[in-house]
Image (cartoon, rainbow, N blue to C red):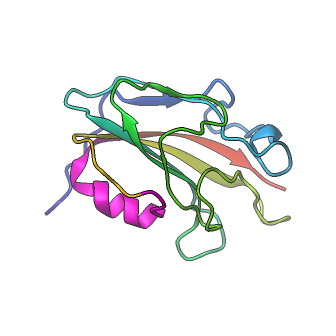
Amino acid sequence: MAQELNVAALKVSSPALDAHGRIPQRYTPDGDDVSPPLAWTGVPEGTRSFAVVVHDPDAPLVDGFTHWVLSGIPVGTTRLAENEPAFNAGRNSLGHTGYDGPAPPPGHGPHHYYFWVYALDAELDLEPGLDRRSLLERIEDHVIEQARIVGVYEH
């Protein structure tokens, strides 16, 4: 089944970072390594839950590097607090559940970190610990709209 492109009003922002700006050290292992606050507006009609994925496609790995997988975010939620502990944490590329911040290889140049928010048409009962690929397979037929903010970090 071909996916329908849906780009409408969903917008992602963060009071901690500017779009395509440098991610503050606080949100990396060079600092406190806590997740930055996120917010979103323009929630599409029919949304029943959200998922969040933070991914670095610039990592020198075949599928990039995933820093955070989060699902089970209820429809009334429009923001995640800094160091958000709630909701259903998935497994990142380090094998940890929860957030592990940007840590690109020294001298590898700037890496782009995509903070994706997915608006879903269902409240999916997903098991904890799903990695990015598994989460995306499970939500693929339920994504109404997706949006992102991109931050940059380098050593």
Q: Residue at x 22, y 42 (%)?
A: 122
The magenta region covers: 128-146
Side of 102 relative to 116 (left or right): right
Q: Is 139 left, or right, of 108 in this rendering?
A: left
Q: Position of residue 11 (x, y in %)?
A: 43, 29
Kindly identify the residue that appears in the image at 21 percent across and 54 percent down.
Answer: 141
Q: Position of residue 36 (x, y in %)?
A: 66, 35
Count of residue discs = 0
Q: Residue at x 69, y 28 (%)?
A: 16
Horizontal side of 62 relative to 132 (left or right) equals: right
Q: Position of residue 109 (x, y in %)?
A: 77, 60
In depth, the one of 18 and 27 nearer the eye is: 27
Taking the magenta stretch, the answer to whether it contains residue 72 is: no
The quarter holding residue 51 reads top left
Quadrant placement of the N terminus: bottom left
Above or below for 126 versus 150: below
Q: Residue at x 34, y 54 (%)?
A: 126
In which quadrant will I find the C terminus? Answer: bottom right
Q: Nearer the viewer, residue 14 or 78?
A: 78
> Looking at the rendering, which quadrant does residue 72 occupy?
top left
Q: Residue furthest bottom?
A: 62
Task: Examine the rendered structure and indicate whether residue 88 appears above or below residue 3.
Answer: above
Q: Is residue 136 magenta?
A: yes
Q: Position of residue 28 (x, y in %)?
A: 77, 47
Q: Nearer the viewer, residue 62 or 130?
A: 130
